[in-house]
Amino acid sequence: MKKIKIILIVIALLVIAASTNFSCDPPKDDCDGKGTLSIENKSLSTVQRLMIDGVNYGSVDPGDKKEAKLAPGTHSWQMAGISGGTGCSAATVIIVACQTSSFSCSAK
């Protein structure tokens, strides 16, 4: 009886081992230790200029998104209207490595 129990336990362990993916390699992140700030321009007709920490990251057309890879930590961003419309107030975001923080601006 003990031999049967031992055999069943060994078979169960072999089944578990066969269905588990063991690896000695550390997980690979393609983020290079940076996080992503994703901003969407939800305005209907205003092209927005994306400013992050006082640096111009280019324009964002209505309905489009722009992403920026940033070092972890606190950053400030603002959307400024450049085609006659208003922008959105400045905001602060805490960027976390390998994560995305998403926001939108729907200025008129």
Image: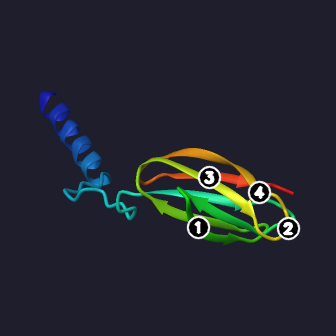
Q: Which residue is mark 2?
A: 84
Q: Which mark is residue 102?
A: 3
Q: Which structural element holds mark 1?
A: strand
As drawn, 41 above or below 17: below
Q: Amino acid at mark 3?
A: Ser
Q: Which mark is residue 87?
A: 4
Mark 1–mark 3 contact, CB under 8 Å? no
Cα gap from disc 3 to disc 2, whole angstroms: 25 Å
Q: Amino acid at mark 1?
A: Asn
Q: Which residue is mark 1?
A: 56
Residue farthest to the top, as pictured: 1
| Neighbourhood count class around disc 1 (C-alpha, 10 Å): few under 14, some 14–19, many 20 upward | few
Q: Residue at x 15, y 34 (%)?
A: 6
Cα gap from disc 1 to disc 2, whole angstroms: 18 Å
Cα gap from disc 1 to disc 4, whole angstroms: 14 Å
Q: Nearer the viewer, residue 78 or 105?
A: 78
108 relative position to 69: left or right = right
51 relative position to 98: left or right = right
Q: Amino acid at mark 2?
A: Gly
Q: Which structural element holds mark 3?
A: strand
Q: Which quadrant would the C terminus be assigned to in this image?
A: bottom right
The mark that comes first in sequence, 1 or 4, is 1
Q: Which structural element holds mark 4?
A: loop
Residue 17 lies, in percent from the top left, at 24, 49
Count of number-bearing discs = 4
Cα gap from disc 1 to disc 3, whole angstroms: 18 Å
Residue farthest to the left, as pictured: 3
